[in-house]
Image (cartoon, rainbow, N blue to C red):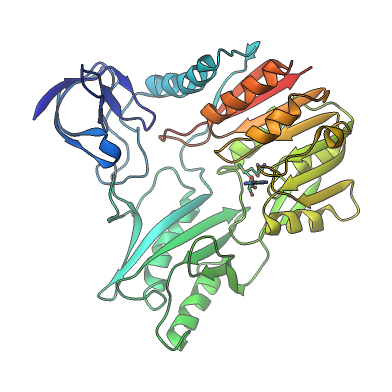
Amino acid sequence: MAELDISELGPQADGIHRSAQDPVYIDRALPGEKVRADVQRGSGGVLRGELREIVTPSPDRIAAPCIHYDVCGGCSIQHASEAFYRDWKTGVVRAALAREDLSPETWLDPVFIPAATRRRATFVALKKNGRVTLGYFRRRSHQIAEITDCLIVDPAIMALRTQLSVALVPILQDGKQADIFVQVVEGRSEIVITGPMGGKGGMDLAMHEAFASLIRDAKVSRISWRTREREAPEVLLEAAPLLAPFNAITVTLPPLAFLQPTKVGERTLVDAVMAGIPQRGKFADLFSGCGTFTGAMLERGRVDAFDGNEAAVKALSKAGGQKALKAVQRDLFHDPLQADELSAYAAVVFDPPRAGALEQARVLANTEVPRVIAASCNPATFARDARILVEGGYRLETVKIVDQFLWSQHVELVAVFSR
Ligand SMILES: C[S@@+](CC[C@H](N)C(=O)[O-])C[C@H]1O[C@@H](n2cnc3c(N)ncnc32)[C@H](O)[C@@H]1O
């Protein structure tokens, strides 16, 4: 066992011990602490320390509020004071920008979304000997920890989880794992099962009854299923459509639709994006999803929305009706909008996945689009894309940090650029 001084937090919120050799990453250690840990080389040759004892605790250390904290791999940093946590989260964004030699003209006040607001969760389920374990993966493990009380999610999701742990018994195959995605939207909920289900003969009576009980007793609006990730889910039962109101439009969501993880976070991001949008004009919403920003932008003019996901684009198209909206399916990594197309817009919004919008940023940097607004869930790829825009002559006016991923290493932001 080694005694290690922790100097900083790493990208996964684990403590880092620096020595003459490689850094050692120690889960749940805080800067300023001296800890005892068993050190081993993990995957990729990285040195990892298993925390055994905190010799000198940080003054910022607190008792983690969750009863599952010791086993659950879901939250990475519940053991730090709120002040430390907030400082660290904003520091992650500031450091990512500083690495690209960037700083906005104005840092807007950050927003920290509270617990019990997450409206989507993916549980892992395993049926063994007629009993279903339903929870999240354990820390750095593929074993499942039964989670009966998750502090970050909407309590409606945990209430549904209790009913699911019974209803899934006749549905799941013994010894086989499945993912159970739950999303609660405006008081209605959907379930998407990914993995093997049922016996050899397909759906039997007991399964039918279990699904029906979820719809009837647990008031689930829709249940869908797919055998593996990347497949489109098949709707098995639908009692009512899942409707998402996005300002000027209401979208009937397809199964597994991307939504911002919290409603309050969605409102915060929409307000931050709209602060960068002119009062009237024609706009583009790139990586639009089902239209979180499109709906608000439509209140100020015409909007062309682009996304790679066919189901999302179809749903948005339908919601647009006769309104001033055109929704287009397009792969913006391989086929970004070109300068001649972009010249039509008074403002362009882009909100890519974690990989960022490298190709689109390269084209945007060489246009005269007056305002560009970026939403991002990855400060590193955002900073890379922002550098490209700034080198193309854009000013980075504002950055607003929105922490929608409480107690994790993830953080979101909205940035406004202008020419
Ligand atoms: C972070 S989500 C944002 C969605 C939307 N702006 C919202 O707030 O609800 C990222 C979106 O990028 C889309 N996407 C992922 N890869 C893409 C690609 N190569 N081309 C176009 N869209 C893509 C996804 O379908 C998803 O809707």
Residue ID at (56%, 62%): 190
Residue ID at (61%, 48%): 259
Residue 388: image x %, image y %? 65, 22
Quadrant housing residue 371: top right
In the picture, measured across the screen, residue 6 lies left or right of residue 367, that is left
Residue found farthest to the front: 334
- Number of numbered tags placed on the structure image: 0
Specify the quarter for ligand 1: top right
Quadrant for the N terminus in the image? top left
Quadrant for the C terminus in the image? top right
Residue 263: image x %, image y %? 60, 42
* Residue 268 visible to an observer of this rendering: no
Quadrant housing residue 248: top right
Residue 339: image x %, image y %? 82, 32
In the picture, measured across the screen, residue 325 lies left or right of residue 218, that is right
Residue found farthest to the left: 1
Residue 159: image x %, image y %? 44, 58
Quadrant housing residue 42: top left
From the viewer's side, name the closer residue of 151 and 19: 19
Residue ID at (45%, 55%): 122
Residue ID at (36%, 50%): 149
In the picture, measured across the screen, residue 266 lies left or right of residue 28, that is right
Residue found farthest to the top: 105
Q: Is residue 245 above or below residue 388?
A: below
* Residue 126 visible to an observer of this rendering: yes
